[in-house]
Amino acid sequence: MILRTGKFLHCLKRAGKMKIKIYDNTGQRKAGTVVYKKQENIFAYKMILPAVIVIFGVLLYPIIYSLIMSFSKLDLAERTMNFIGTKNYAKIFTDSEFQQSILQTIRFTIITVFFEMVLGVACALVLNQKFRGCGFLRGVMILPWALPNVVNAVMWKWIYNSSYGALNALLKQLGLINAYKVWLGTPESAFHCVAFCNIWKETPYVVLLVLAGLSNINHDLYEAARVDGSSSWHSFWKITLPLLRPVTSVLIITKTIWAIQTFDLVYVLTGGGPANATEFISVYIHKVAFKFTQFGYGSALSYVLMLVTFFLCLAYIRNLAKQGELG
Amino acid sequence: MVKTSALLMAAVTAAGLCAGCGSGSTAGTTAAAEKATTAGTATTAGTATTAGTATTAAKAASDMKGTKITVLLPQHEMDNIGFMKKKTDEFSKETGIQVELINESWDNVADKVTAEMTTGGSSYDVIEFDNSWVTKFVKNKWVEPLNQYISDDEKKGIVPGVLKIFSSGDQIYGIPWNNDTRFFMYNKKMLDDAGISAPPKTWDELVTDSKTMMSKGICKYGYIDSLQQAEAETNALTYMVYSFGGAFLDENLKPNVTSAPVKEAYSFVAKAYSEDKIIDPASITSDQANLATVFCNGDTAFFLQGWAGVYAQANDASTSKVAGQVEVAPYSIGKTPEDAAVLSLPEAMAIPTTSKNKDAAWKYIEFMSSRDFDKEKALAIGALPIYSDLFEDKEILAKYPYWENFGKQSANAKGHQPILWHDQFSSAVQTESLKILLEQESVDDGLANLQKQLEAVEQDN
């Protein structure tokens, strides 16, 4: 029950309780204070409490455990952790294989994100038009993204197979190659094949979100621009792209995060080879932790990766906040 | 407040996206084993022990009726007919012990076993125990000593060299289930068509013969090898180094890759790949299954290190285009005939120390490693026996007369050198070897880099 006097009502929310100071019509505070329980707040907190416990329990425990492990060396026989300070983190600066994996990951991220965005926006612009079959095409277009990553990788592994793959067969029949090529057999070729697989799979997601963004653009703007003599290209640069910016900025950040974390595609397709050409950060961390059983060092590497992703997430949240989606 | 909470949640979520590794076991499960109709061929408890012991075993097995065990093993490369699963179902039916058999590729199984052992999980009761893991697993006390279970008859009957690989001191830690020794095979018809009277004994002869056949259009390449960045690549190059009379590690198990025989081996492979072009370029992306496919399609003339089942597969008209053309050589290839070597990569079954059903696990191992089972497996899928006397079994030799040549080649069988740091060793060998083959580094530079890496790893361990 709320007590209200006159035209003034001041209140403080504190831990679900609302403290009301009572004023009269002249603004003079009257003696006495009524403490009022804001039942809605408490109810809300109770409803989300189980989910928060689960989330924090599932996330916090491994995060903290991994952090401790990153400062330790495991005794695999006794299954104990021996504190070694920052040696694991110091090792990162001398680990040439990790440094190479960072470079490859950055290169992969830039290439895939760029092409996914460009192709995604282009496809969305086409699919945003009204033509026969556009609905069907929109449905079919999403199929690559719907494929599980491992299925996608196995499928492409067979397509790229140098002896019996469909790609070699197609290109040879079209006369584009004279002999079958070993697509995954050289570092550069394998890298670009992996990148292509990722672009093929992830572009539909960009198309989907950009289509949603395009649907929110008022067509009157294009009409007005046409009346003013604007070309289609000019309208795209001056109207479409700026108004798509909230969507594209979110996409760039999320795509970057996903590209950095790419693991299953590479693990199945190339295993990180040939000669570590496709050994990205996540693949290398997996190798250190699960093949070499260096869990301490693997944890330290994971935290480095987590920090990079954390800052990208911060950028994502700030971007959303700027757009007014956070209060 | 909202902003702070949201940022905190976002930070935690971001951290959670890359939650640290080593956080618990990665046990995988598959559907439970199906119940199959019995063929009534297996012995009751599947043991090769005396009648008295069998009775005891049967009693013990009946005590474990209803127990469920989980077995994690790689798919047997020769088992294309579901033989292992069928026998597992028979074991379940006979003993009442339910078995969840998980078969995956060797690399997947290796990842799962490693993760499970390091985290101390108890998801598996019988695990794959590879020949390269013995030192690490025994040192870390991950597997149970089996001396208390294994009978004297089994100890004496199993090929001593193979059983010894899975022992440490006088303790046995694994019972072999796959006597994976590799042999040199060739397409005799291709050699005959090229006017070559006998398979090559040396690497120089191999190059000459390959070029002859390739120039006449008899085959596309001399041979294909598994040089994909995976464990199979390490196997292939280990064999190559052995066949030049060398080894990656010296007698004290210290890195020795800059020695003359290793350089010769790598120089040969690099030249054969890049200049002579007798090695199928697809080797860089080929796993072992692909090698058999290419050989059985008639694209290559030689199979340097084929597992026992390749012969049967290659001569099976339903799966091969070269049926009736493949032979097993009475020797393997070396720099000189005296250097000839074959690689032996046996695999065993072991019981993790964390298993909660050790007795039931042993019953399974006992059944799947009995002499009767071994003979049945040899006849059904052509797998090499683990019992010595079966190599002279008349029934088996009548079906596989070429096993006589297997035996001749086996005299030079060698396995991986037992080191604690085999995984790091293998990873370094795979990467640097590919850099040499892809001409990113010269042989000398690549081996020098490999030596440095292995020395650093050896010191760390």
Image: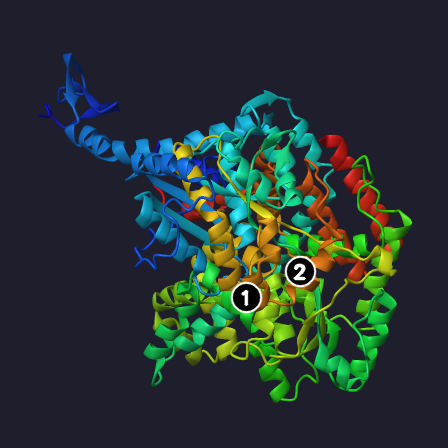
Q: CA distance from mark 1 to mark 2?
A: 19 Å
Residue topped by disc 2: B228
- The x and y percentages for residue B388 are 61, 49
**Local SS, label 1:** helix
Q: Residues within 10 Å of mark 1 (few under 14, many from 20)?
A: many
Q: Quadrant of the C terminus of chain B?
A: top right
From the viewer's side, name the closer residue of B388 and A203: B388
Pick the front one: B5 or A46: A46
Q: Position of residue B168 (x, y in %)?
A: 64, 32
Residue to which mark 1 is pinned: A197
User: Does residue B219 show up?
Assistant: no
Nearer to us: label 1 or label 2: 2
Q: Residue furthest right?
A: B260
User: From where the camera sits, is residue A1 visible?
Assistant: yes
Residue in the image at 61% along x and 41% along y? B163
B225 to the left or right of A81: right
Which image quadrant is residue A23 in? top left
Q: Which disc number belongs to residue B414? A: none
Near-viewer residue (B329 or B78): B329
